[in-house]
């Protein structure tokens, strides 16, 4: 048994403030009433949306045989036109590279105006609304606009990817800049640094790993998107896919699908390695 002297030498246990304890316990409590109401509302919204969109599992089951028949027709893949496929894939990849570089640069410029910790209020709202309008336009609509302006071909697809990137990745760039630690910014403001110096030395270095990661994700998306833009004549392999489907040339179609899967997988793996190293 400990003596009185030993008891006195022991450090006293820190006492937690009752209000702080109550606040910590509340953080782990589930607000049952709100949780139940929210769950019921979410289910109701889902059922309402499924009914309005004519979502039907039974119809999917009935059409499974047609899907199986379509897949069966694609075997075996026909690689007799592998040269044409590789050339179109190369064109698709080139479109994605150019569209990503131009889109990332313009998105970064737009992001400086759309970040609330950098831009004044009037410029912030102009840039945000511009990106909202671009995001509201489907990529195929943007591609059709440029096809009508510059004609068929990959140039129209590059322009469509560039403009589409501003709406999507520009917002993410801006939010990455807004999420940086305020400490370095406050320290530089305290020593009288200019706005340009704060952006150059406090904001951009912190956000750079995220900006690079998002740019790689943009590139992956543009490779897949370039195959879709070709459906409206904006270059890439999409037009050849449409032609093969219209001619019921399923073997050639399946060969192109396999090549696209291989290309996208390689790019995804390479991007994942790069993102892992920078983050």
Image (cartoon, rainbow, N blue to C red):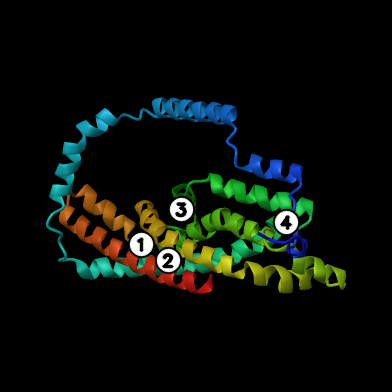
From the image, state whether disc 4 or disc 3 is nearer to you: 4
Residue 13 numbered mark, or none: 4
Q: CA distance from mark 4 to mark 3?
A: 68 Å
Q: CA distance from mark 1 to mark 4?
A: 70 Å
Q: CA distance from mark 1 to mark 3?
A: 12 Å
Residue drawn at (77%, 70%), measured in percent from left and top?
198
- Along the viewing direction, whichever of 124 and 86 lies nearer the viewer: 124
Residue 236 numbered mark, or none: 1
Report helix, strand or loop for mark 4.
Answer: loop
- Along the viewing direction, whichever of 70 and 146 lies nearer the viewer: 70
Packing grade of label 2 (10 A; few <14, some 14-19, many >=20) is: many
The quadrant of the rendering that contains the N terminus is bottom right
Packing grade of label 4 (10 A; few <14, some 14-19, many >=20) is: few
From the image, state whether disc 4 or disc 2 is nearer to you: 4
The first of marks 4 and 2 along the sequence is: 4
Is 222 situated left or right of 79 in this image?
A: right
Report helix, strand or loop for mark 3.
Answer: helix
Report the residue marked by disc 3: 143
Report the residue marked by disc 2: 95
* Residue 270: percent from left, percent from top: 40, 71
Residue 15 numbered mark, or none: none
Using the rendered image of the protein, determine whether residue 234 is visible from the camera's viewpoint: no
From the image, state whether disc 1 or disc 4 is nearer to you: 4
The answer to whether the residues at label 1 and label 2 have Cβ atoms under 8 Å apart is yes
The first of marks 1 and 4 along the sequence is: 4
* Residue 206: percent from left, percent from top: 65, 69
């Amino acid at each position: 048994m400990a003596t009185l002297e030993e008891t006195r030498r022991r450090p006293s246990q820190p006492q937690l403030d009752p209000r702080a304890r109550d606040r910590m316990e509340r953080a782990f409590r589930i607000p049952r009433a709100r949780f139940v109401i929210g769950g019921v509302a979410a289910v109701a919204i889902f059922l309402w949306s499924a009914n309005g969109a004519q979502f039907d599992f039974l119809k999917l089951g009935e059409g499974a045989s047609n899907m199986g028949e379509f897949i069966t027709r694609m075997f075996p893949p026909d690689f007799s036109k592998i040269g044409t496929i590789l050339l179109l894939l190369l064109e698709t990849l080139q479109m994605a590279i150019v569209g990503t570089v131009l889109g990332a640069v313009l998105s970064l410029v737009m992001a400086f105006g759309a970040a609330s910790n950098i831009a004044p209020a009037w410029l912030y709202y102009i840039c945000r609304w511009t990106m909202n309008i671009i995001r509201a336009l489907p990529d195929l609509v943007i591609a059709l606009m440029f096809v009508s302006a510059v004609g068929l071909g990959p140039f129209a697809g590059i322009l469509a990817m560039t403009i589409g990137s501003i709406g999507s990745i520009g917002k993410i760039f801006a939010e990455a800049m807004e999420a940086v630690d305020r400490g370095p910014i406050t320290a530089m403001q305290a020593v009288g640094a200019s706005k340009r110096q704060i952006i150059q030395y406090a904001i951009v270095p912190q956000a750079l790993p995220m900006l690079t990661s998002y740019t790689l994700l943009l590139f992956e998306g543009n490779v897949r998107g370039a195959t879709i833009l070709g459906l409206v004549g904006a270059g890439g392999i999409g037009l050849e896919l449409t032609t093969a489907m219209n001619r019921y040339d399923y073997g050639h179609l399946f060969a192109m699908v396999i090549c696209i899967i291989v290309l996208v997988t390689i790019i995804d793996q390479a991007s994942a390695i790069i993102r892992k190293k920078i983050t």
